[in-house]
Amino acid sequence: MFVADAMLKKLARWLRLLGVEVLYPPSIDDDDIIEFTKKSNKILLTMDSELCRRARKQGRSVFLVPRKSTDEQLALLIKRFKLDVSDAPSRVLCPLCNGTLKEVGKKEVKGKVPAELLQKHDVFWKCSGCKKVFWEGSHWERINRKVERIKEMTR
Ligand SMILES: [Zn+2]
């Protein structure tokens, strides 16, 4: 759906947690980002008005993200692009790399996560891209609260 520039790492991570695909171009050069947006046929997100202007001039879809809190930025994007976040927080996209998460059992993560986690949790998620393992730990509570707050803002 989106391509985010290097300044929007945090926003990208949260969009993925909301279940929205966000790619990072491998380069931070403006021309490369615009080219990457063209090739991937996605919408460029940036806070850089100069990059926004240049991308627009070249006919790219681009959205200038206002300098606001992440919560406000997310609420704005949800409304502007009518994003479906009803299933959020998402267990589908890796917040770190946009890879696909797969539900895995204890056996598959044994040795990869601390032993105490294996006792506490039955279900884990493994990223097909960066191979990182996720679980619904205490951070998940915080994620849930933030997602609820954002959903509230879009009502
Ligand atoms: Zn990943």
Image (cartoon, helix red, strand yellow):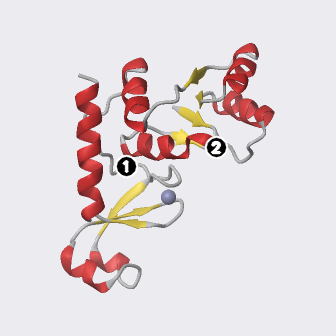
Q: Is residue 19 visible in the rendered structure shown here?
A: yes
Q: Cα distance, mark 1 to mark 2?
A: 23 Å
22 horizontally vs 57: left or right: left
Residue beneath disc 2: 6
- Quarter of the figure with the C terminus: top left
The disc, 1 or 2, on the residue closer to the chain's N-terminal end is 2
In the rendering, at what x and y percent does residue 15 appear?
43, 40
149 horizontally vs 18: left or right: left
In the rendering, at what x and y percent does residue 55 appear?
71, 22
- Residue 145 versus residue 57: which sits nearer the camera? 145
In the depicted structure, whether residue 71 falls above or below residue 91: above
- Residue 101 versus residue 72: which sits nearer the camera? 72
Residue beneath disc 1: 92
Asked which quadrant contains residue 19, the reply is: top left
Q: Disc 1 marks which amino acid? A: Val
- Residue 112 versus residue 54: which sits nearer the camera? 54
In the rendering, at what x and y percent does residue 16 appear?
43, 44
Secondary structure of the residue carrying numbered label 1: loop
Residue at the spot 36% in from the left edge and 77% down from the top edge = 109
- Residue 76 versus residue 109: which sits nearer the camera? 76
Q: In the rendered structure, find residue 35 and report the number of the disc placed on it.
A: none
Classify 10 Å Cα crowding around label 1: few (below 14), some (14-19), many (20 and above).
Answer: many
In the rendering, at what x and y percent does residue 78 appear?
38, 26
Classify 10 Å Cα crowding around label 2: few (below 14), some (14-19), many (20 and above).
Answer: some
Residue at the spot 30% in from the left edge and 45% down from the top edge = 89
Q: Nearer the viewer, mark 1 or mark 2?
A: 2
Q: How many marks?
A: 2
Secondary structure of the residue carrying numbered label 2: helix
Q: Disc 2 marks which amino acid? A: Ala
